[in-house]
Structure formats: C-alpha cells, structure tokens
Image: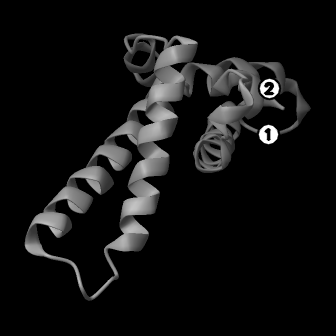
Amino acid sequence: MYLKEIGRVELLSGEEERRLAQAIEDGNRAALELDRPDLTDVERRRLMRAVNAGQSAKSELIQANLRLVVSIAKRYTLRGMQFLDLIQEGNLGLMRAVDKFDYTKGFKFSTYATW
C-alpha cells in the first residue's frame, strides 16, 4: 500500500526543487520574524502565510522524494535490518536533508540527500 501511494507522487524537476527550497527558506525566515513584538496585523498575516507556504513546500519536497528512500533501502536489505526499519530511518534522514539542503549551490536535491 505505502509503495503504491508514494509511486503516485510526481517527481520534481530541478527548478521545482529550487522553488520549494526557496519557499522553505522564506518560511523559516518568516518564523523567526514572527517573534518581533512590533509587528502590525498585516505583517503578522503576511509572515504566517510565508510560514504556512514553507511548511507545505517542505511536505511536498519530502513526499516527492520518498521513492528515493525506498530505492536506497532496497540496496541494504540483506545487511541485517528489516526493510521497513530501513525505510523509517531513511525517512528521518530525508527530513533532515530537506532541512539542510542549500539550493543555491546548484545541486539536485536527490544528489544532496544521497550524499
């Protein structure tokens, strides 16, 4: 069931990855600015929209790369861990890679995440 579901998610182009990574970065920056006490209601709403867009972009980037985790996990199935445990650990690594990805360096996300 899980494998069929992740197979339905479209793969991203390099440009889409950069767009999502930029939205994530903008959302993270907006989240930091939300702590300022001098914000107007309009500014606060604008920042909240950026935070929400960043969270959505992060989710989309993760979902689009779940197949990558499965393909890497398949390579390690005969090394003592259960396949589902490998996927679970890989998903944690994927989430960390999304947080750390620097799109300005020009690499595709999959290259960064597998390295």
Residue nearest the observer in this picture, 86 or 11 = 11
Residue nearest the observer in this picture, 75 or 102 = 102
Q: Provide the residue designation for mark 1.
A: 81
Q: Which mark is residue 28?
A: none
Residue drawn at x 41%, y 13% as measured from the top left: 4
What amino acid type is highlighted by mark number 1? Met
What amino acid type is highlighted by mark number 2? Thr
Is 88 drawn above or below residue 61 in the view shown? below
Q: Provide the residue designation for mark 2.
A: 77
Q: Position of residue 108 (x, y in %)?
A: 68, 21
Query: Could you tell me how far apart the alpha carbons at marks 2 and 1 are, in whole angstroms?
Result: 6 Å
Q: Quadrant of the N terminus?
A: top left
Q: Quadrant of the C terminus?
A: top right
Q: Are marks 2 and 1 in contact (CB under 8 Å)?
A: yes
Identify the element where label 1 is drawn. loop
| Neighbour tally class for label 2: few under 14, some 14-19, many 20 plus, Cα within 10 Å | some
